[in-house]
Amino acid sequence: MIPLGTKERTEVFENVRKAVAKKIFAPGFDAKVWARVCEAHRERILAADTVEEFEAEVRALLAELKISHITFFHRSLLKIPPQYAIGATFQREQVNGMAHWMFQDVHEGSPPHIAGVQPGDLLLEIEGNAVSPPEPPAFRMGGFCEVGIEKLNGERTTVKLGVPLPSSKWHPIVRPRLVSWSKPQPGIGLLKVTGFPGQVGIDLAKEIDHAISELRDCDRLIIDLRGNPGGGAGGLRLMSYMTPGKIPVGYSVTQKRAAKGFKKEKLPRFGKIPSRKIALYPLMLRYAFSDRSIVMVTEGLGPQPFHGRIVLLVNQHTASAAETITGFAKENKLATIVGTKTPGQVLGGTGFKMGHGFVLRIPVVTFHTWNGDTLEGRGVEPDQVVEFSREALKERADPQLENAVETARHL
């Protein structure tokens, strides 16, 4: 436990209170409600005399907002959600009358995948400490940790997971494979994308190009975005393969732009991912003075053999840029969406230093579909709801994927 003095606690709390009131931009935020919630939590927060306890209390305060893309952490702790830390997601599951966290998405190349963990396995412990809902699992970055799991067949075991530091070159842990492809049946291509790293996504766009070229003989395409937490603009390449022409995806707006008033048709447009990194410089100059209010437009890549026969696989972890893709497909009727409802988390965030090693990340940009719909807090309903459960996994390897394949066959 790291001690934290009264003066430091008060200073950081006041910085958080003021930063949220002044800088946050999100649907449903009410400054008066925020002020009341802060006062209700003030005593508990200022009584938390260690970094760990203080972090937990401030996070409890921020959770009252029920707004996505908000986090608060101390740099020394480096505990982050599993989709970013270990390339896996979890689903709450009742087993023998008890609530557990079940591994849901285990991405290829991730630490759990390397350790032999599979969807449907239960997470029992992290470093000897029991883990169960409602407290979400979190992993300390840098090094290894032992986790206790229960396999689908009931066997209990312990595995070691490597949890890499962000952008670490020395750590020998493989990141999840971002793009993979296969052909579950003749004529049906399966393209899985697990994230959209990078602000512009040049390297990712090239990987998607390669995958599509490998699937060129397929006249049906399944795009698997389950467990994809989003990221940068690389998702534009994926949306551009869903439709032949250049059509608007949606627009992002900052608090400053919204206050001034705007016409979406007049906002700066982003409609092409550069093929080379040297092209980033003119792109940066073009948007250097932009306030992040922007329209995204597909690239116009031309006809594809699978157009009109696309299935999109999503779940409650398909967020941010991945959820934008889902909303775009739904609005323009470009795909049959299969799985479970997306979480409604599509805001753009920025980090702010709060002093004494603490960082607050809050949303400062809202996203709207071209028709003006707001996905934040609402999510996207699939056309075909297919649940994911431990019992179903005991009978079928992947019930959601099997349903997607069957749907694709009949398109």
Image: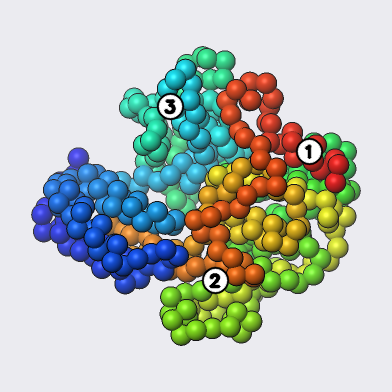
Q: Amino acid at mark 3?
A: Ala
Mark 1 crowd level (few <14, some 14–19, many ≥20, 10 Å Cα): many
Q: Is 346 on the left or on the right of 147, as rendered?
A: right
Q: Amino acid at mark 1?
A: Val
Question: Disc 2 marks which residue?
Answer: 252
Residue 220 lies, with reference to residue 346, above or below; the image says above
Residue 176 lies, with reference to residue 254, above or below; the image says above
Q: Nearer the viewer, residue 48 or 63?
A: 63
- Residue 153 in percent (x, y) is at 57, 15
Which circle marks residue 405 in the picture?
Answer: 1
Label 3 secondary element: strand
Q: Amino acid at mark 2?
A: Ser
- Residue 253 in percent (x, y) is at 51, 74
Residue 230 visible in the current orientation = no
In space, the residues marked 1 and 2 are separated at their CA atoms by: 34 Å
Residue at (43, 75) in percent of width and height: 255
In space, the residues marked 2 and 3 are separated at their CA atoms by: 38 Å
Residue at (76, 72) in percent of width and height: 246
Q: Is 368 on the left or on the right of 403, as rendered?
A: left
Label 2 secondary element: strand
Label 1 secondary element: helix
Q: How many marks?
A: 3
Mark 2 crowd level (few <14, some 14–19, many ≥20, 10 Å Cα): many
Residue 252 lies, with reference to residue 88, above or below; the image says below
Query: Sequence order check: which comes first, mark 2 or mark 3?
Result: 3
Query: Sequence order check: which comes first, mark 1 or mark 2?
Result: 2
Q: Nearer the viewer, mark 2 or mark 3?
A: 3
Question: Disc 3 marks which residue?
Answer: 99
